[in-house]
Amino acid sequence: MTTFRKIVTGIATLAAAFGGVFVAGPPAAAAGKWCNHSVCIETYDHGTYLGRVEVSVTNTNQPHQITARVWTTNGWSARAKAENVAAFRTYRDQAYPQRHFPAGTRLCAEGFRGGTSVGLPCVTLTG
């Protein structure tokens, strides 16, 4: 692993451990898809209500075990299933918050490929 990747992984791990979300993201007033490196989150609802959130992780040219977690800055979180994914396949799973969140809440997802973080997209929910 390159030094740069070790530093980025270390920073992401520290931010997750302290509950701080430092990745800037656009506001979400409507359904959409937001990506960071190999990880994407997609919402299907409008405003501050989240019924379903999809997380996807793009795999590389080697099979890996892929996992993900999804959370908001006001305390909701869910772990996605662990799945062994073949080379060049995309892992997908859904989380179902089914609730309204205060405007300004950040929705984030982190994907892991073989235990290593490979992306951390975040979006701010707006009314």
Image (tube, helix red, strand yellow):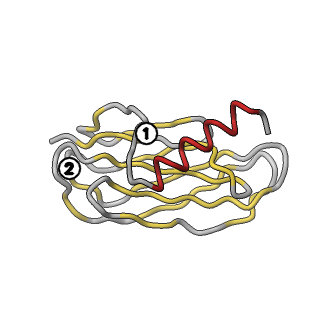
> In x, y percent, where is residue 94?
47, 62
State the residue in front, 43 or 76: 76
Element marked by disc 2: loop
Q: Is 72 drawn above or below residue 22 in the view shown?
A: below
> In x, y percent, where is residue 25?
38, 33
- How far apart are labels 1 and 2 at the CA level? 15 Å
Element marked by disc 1: strand
Q: Residue furthest right?
A: 62
The circle on residue 33 is 1
Residue for point 43% across, 46% down: 42
> In x, y percent, where is residue 125?
25, 43
Residue for point 60% across, 35% down: 37
Q: Is 22 drawn above or below residue 46 in the view shown?
A: above
Task: Write down the residue under mark 2.
Answer: 48
What's under tag 1, amino acid-wise? Lys
Using a 10 Å C-alpha cutoff, classify the residue at mark 1 as few (fewer than 14 neighbours), some (14 to 19) or many (20 or more): some
> In x, y percent, where is residue 47?
20, 45
State the residue in front, 4 or 112: 4
Where is the N terminus found, in terms of image quarters? Answer: top right
Residue for point 66% across, 45% down: 58
Using a 10 Å C-alpha cutoff, classify the residue at mark 2 as few (fewer than 14 neighbours), some (14 to 19) or many (20 or more): many
Residue for point 47% across, 56% down: 17
Where is the C terminus found, in terms of image quarters? Answer: top left
Left or right of residue 109: residue 104: left
Query: Mark 1 or mark 2: which comes first in sequence?
Result: 1
What's under tag 2, amino acid-wise? Thr
